[in-house]
């Protein structure tokens, strides 16, 4: 019997214990991996172990276990997650709003002056309703910015799509389709507006050349402010919901 036949398929994760806590470690086998690597995603808090094809699961388990302290330290440093549930505070256009339950039906209602986001319906549906509210508001602000910059640029995108992207806040395809993260609605308005200007400038300049930046700065008055904000606070937007 060959070794290959003896090998069972990998589970998608292993569990390790450290100091009374238990951690879930996702397993990712990569033929191109040269050694075992452990990562903790700052966006999601997911722990991922990448291993070469030839490494055994026992080796992976031992490796992850020996890094239990490192995993615990990394996770402890991550900003706490904020769920979309009653009592939690989330930023909308940079303004902190407390999620409240309200009587009746219909959509969630934001009151920036009082700092509340009133959500109707059963508590079990609150997270979905808050998310729907944020996506709807993001779509509205994006449409307004797209209209403004379309007029300024004399060119409009083929399509605008909202996603929950982890690595990029916005992107532009060769076909002129723009994608944005709905999480931009959480940031101060200049940030979403700048992202639109940035991606719209790509309709003309599909690169980050000096010509691209000149055009972006010509279109949008707060490029630097928004870039600075994203660098400092961008990753925090992933802790909500
Ligand atoms: Zn770009």
Image (cartoon, rainbow, N blue to C red):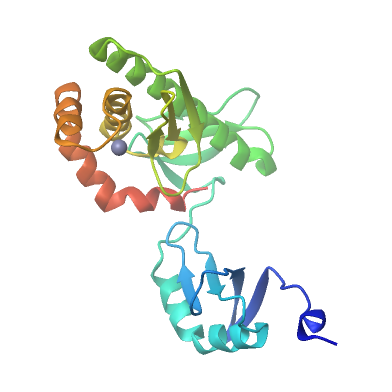
As rendered, which of 175 and 98 lies closer to the eye? 175
Which picture quadrant has residue 155? top left
As rendered, which of 31 and 128 lies closer to the eye? 31
- Taking the image as shown, residue 224 lies to the left or right of residue 124, namely left
- Taking the image as shown, residue 23 lies to the left or right of residue 161, namely right
Q: Residue 234's x, y, as percent?
A: 33, 48
Which residue lies most toward the right here? Answer: 1
Ligand 1's image quarter is top left
Q: What residue is shown at x 58% (from left), y 25% (from top)?
A: 107
- Taking the image as shown, residue 14 lies to the left or right of residue 193, namely right
Q: Residue 89's x, y, as percent?
A: 44, 46
Q: What residue is shown at x 25% (from left), y 14% (from top)?
A: 153
Q: Residue 176's x, y, as percent?
A: 41, 23
As rendered, which of 145 and 81 lies closer to the eye? 145
- Residue 102 lies, with reference to residue 99, above or below; the image says above
Q: What residue is shown at x 28% (from left), y 17% (from top)?
A: 149
- Residue 174 lies, with reference to residue 143, above or below; the image says below
Q: What residue is shown at x 51% (from left), y 72% (from top)?
A: 33
Q: Residue 218's x, y, as percent?
A: 14, 23
- Residue 154 lies, with reference to residue 79, above or below; the image says above
Considering the image in quadrants, where does the N terminus appear? bottom right
Residue 6 visible in this rendered orientation of the protein: yes
Residue 221 visible in this rendered orientation of the protein: no
């Amino acid at each position: 019997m060959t070794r290959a036949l003896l090998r069972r398929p990998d589970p998608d994760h292993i569990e390790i214990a450290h100091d009374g806590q238990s951690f879930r470690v996702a397993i990712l086998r990569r033929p191109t991996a040269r050694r075992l690597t452990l990562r903790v995603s700052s966006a999601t808090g997911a722990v991922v172990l990448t291993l070469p094809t030839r490494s055994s699961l026992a080796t992976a388990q031992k490796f992850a276990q020996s890094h239990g302290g490192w995993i615990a330290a990394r996770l402890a440093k991550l900003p706490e997650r904020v769920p979309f549930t009653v009592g939690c505070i989330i930023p909308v256009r940079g303004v902190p709003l407390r999620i409240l339950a309200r009587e009746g039906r219909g959509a969630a209602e934001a009151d920036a002056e009082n700092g509340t986001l009133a959500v109707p319906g059963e508590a079990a549906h609150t997270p979905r309703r808050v998310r729907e509210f944020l996506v709807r508001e993001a779509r509205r602000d994006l449409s307004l910015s797209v209209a403004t910059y379309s007029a300024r640029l004399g060119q409009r995108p083929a399509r605008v799509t909202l996603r929950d992207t982890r690595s990029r806040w916005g992107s532009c395809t060769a076909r002129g389709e723009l994608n944005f993260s709905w999480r931009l609605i959480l940031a101060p308005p200049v940030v979403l507006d700048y992202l639109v200007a940035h991606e719209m400038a790509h309709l003309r300049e599909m690169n980050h050349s000096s010509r691209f930046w000149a055009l972006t700065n010509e279109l949008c008055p707060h490029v630097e402010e928004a870039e600075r904000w994203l660098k400092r606070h961008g990753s925090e937007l992933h802790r909500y919901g």
